[in-house]
Image (cartoon, grey):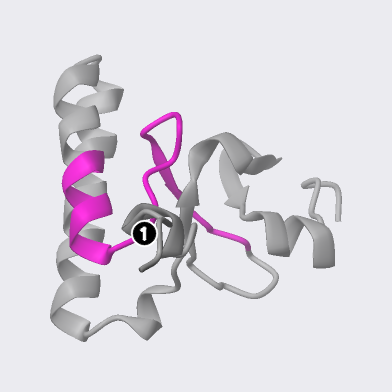
Amino acid sequence: MSVISPARTRPTEIHPHHLPTTIADQADELLDQADWYADHRNLTASALIHAQVIQLIGIRPPASGELARCTCQNCYCAAIFDAAKAHTYLDGTVEFVQCETCADEHRLTGDE
């Protein structure tokens, strides 16, 4: 019998195209709602929605409890991952997010 908790066997990030379309769409809608709540300073509602998404997509809960979506303009991977590991850059006045893999493979600074 294994003593490894089920949470440790879950991935720390997921690419939405690996999920059933209905789950990926639902996760995307929920993350949009969480962003809206965060933008309006309702951080409790945002955190509750992030917890819902974590359960829905089956990833390991990040220590921060907050998720991010990769919006890398170089490859458009769209990974959902721990927000604490996000690399951000500005392209004009728009902020974009890179996951760890994108930042390692093709880090963008907005000066390209």
**Which residue corresponds to the image point at 49% horizontal and 65% vertical from the top-left?**
79
In which quadrant is the N terminus drawn?
Answer: bottom left
Percent x, y of residue 26 = 14, 65
Q: Is residue 10 visible?
A: no
**Which residue corresponds to the image point at 25% horizontal and 14% vertical from the top-left?**
41
Percent x, y of residue 50 = 25, 41
As shown in the figure, which amino acid type bears the numbered disc 1? Ile
Range of residues picked out in magenta: 50-72
Q: Is residue 32 visible?
A: yes
The quadrant where residue 15 appears: bottom left
**Which residue corresponds to the image point at 37% horizontal and 74% vertical from the top-left?**
16
Q: Nearer the viewer, residue 36 or 10?
A: 10
59 relative to 73 in the view: left or right: left
Whether residue 44 is situated above or below residue 63 in the rendered picture: above
Percent x, y of residue 93 = 60, 36
Which secondary structure, mark 1?
A: loop
Q: Label 1 neighbourhood size at 10 Å, few (<14), some (14-19), many (20+)?
A: many
Residue picked out by circle 1: 59
13 relative to 89 in the view: left or right: left
| Residue 75 is inside the magenta segment | no
Q: Residue furthest right?
A: 112
Whether residue 74 is situated above or below residue 81 in the rendered picture: below
